[in-house]
């Protein structure tokens, strides 16, 4: 249940991030530059909020010490990064073999 709630929150934050204007080209006007900085600031704030929410949620649900929670948080994030990297590498290898 915890994982479902956590992922629902993270998908919500990710959806908001996708709705932010994407100004991939170099901003030329002051309005575009302002929108670019605002979009970047909101995206960074959302990422930080998601990371803090995840950490505090782990602390509250499992009722461990702050140090143990930090260790769990770091271990889970490191494991997640490894598995996502393996998945991306496999998909890239399969795509290269098929095309």
Image: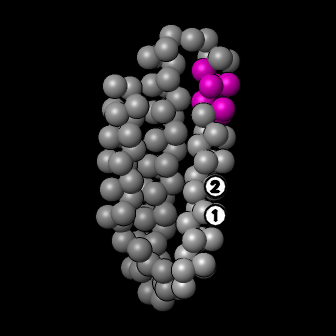
Indicate how the structure is coloured in the image: one colour
Q: Nearer the viewer, residue 91 or 45?
A: 91
**Mark 2 and 1 residues: CB-CB less than 8 Å, in contact?**
yes
35 versus 52 height, above or below: below
14 magenta-colored: no
- Label 1 neighbourhood size at 10 Å, few (<14), some (14-19), many (20+)? few
72 magenta-colored: yes
Name the residue at 66% across, 48% down: 82
**Magenta stretch: helix, strand or loop mostly:** helix
**Label 2 secondary element:** helix
Alpha carbon distance from label 2 to label 1: 5 Å
Q: Position of residue 91 (x, y in %)?
A: 55, 66
Q: Which mark is residue 31?
A: none
Name the residue at 46% across, 41% down: 49
Q: Dot 2 corresponds to which residue?
A: 86
Quarter of the picture containing the N terminus is: top left
**Label 1 secondary element:** helix
Which quadrant of the structure image shows residue 67? top right
Q: Nearer the viewer, residue 97 or 88?
A: 97
Quarter of the picture containing the C terminus is: bottom right
Q: Which residues are magenta?
A: 69-75
Outermost residue, bottom side: 28
- Label 2 neighbourhood size at 10 Å, few (<14), some (14-19), many (20+)? few
Q: Is residue 53 left or right of residue 73?
A: left
Q: Position of residue 18 (x, y in %)?
A: 36, 63
Q: Dot 1 corresponds to which residue?
A: 89
Q: Is residue 10 left or right of residue 73?
A: left
């Amino acid at each position: 249940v915890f994982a479902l709630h956590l992922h629902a929150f993270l998908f919500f934050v990710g959806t908001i991030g996708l709705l932010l204007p994407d100004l991939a080209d170099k901003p030329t006007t002051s309005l575009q530059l302002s929108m670019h900085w605002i979009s970047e600031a909101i995206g960074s704030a959302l990422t930080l909020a998601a990371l803090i929410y995840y950490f505090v949620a782990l602390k509250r649900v499992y009722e461990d010490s702050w140090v143990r929670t930090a260790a769990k948080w770091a271990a889970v994030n490191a494991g997640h990064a490894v598995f996502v990297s393996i998945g991306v590498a496999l998909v890239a290898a399969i795509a290269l073999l098929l095309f």
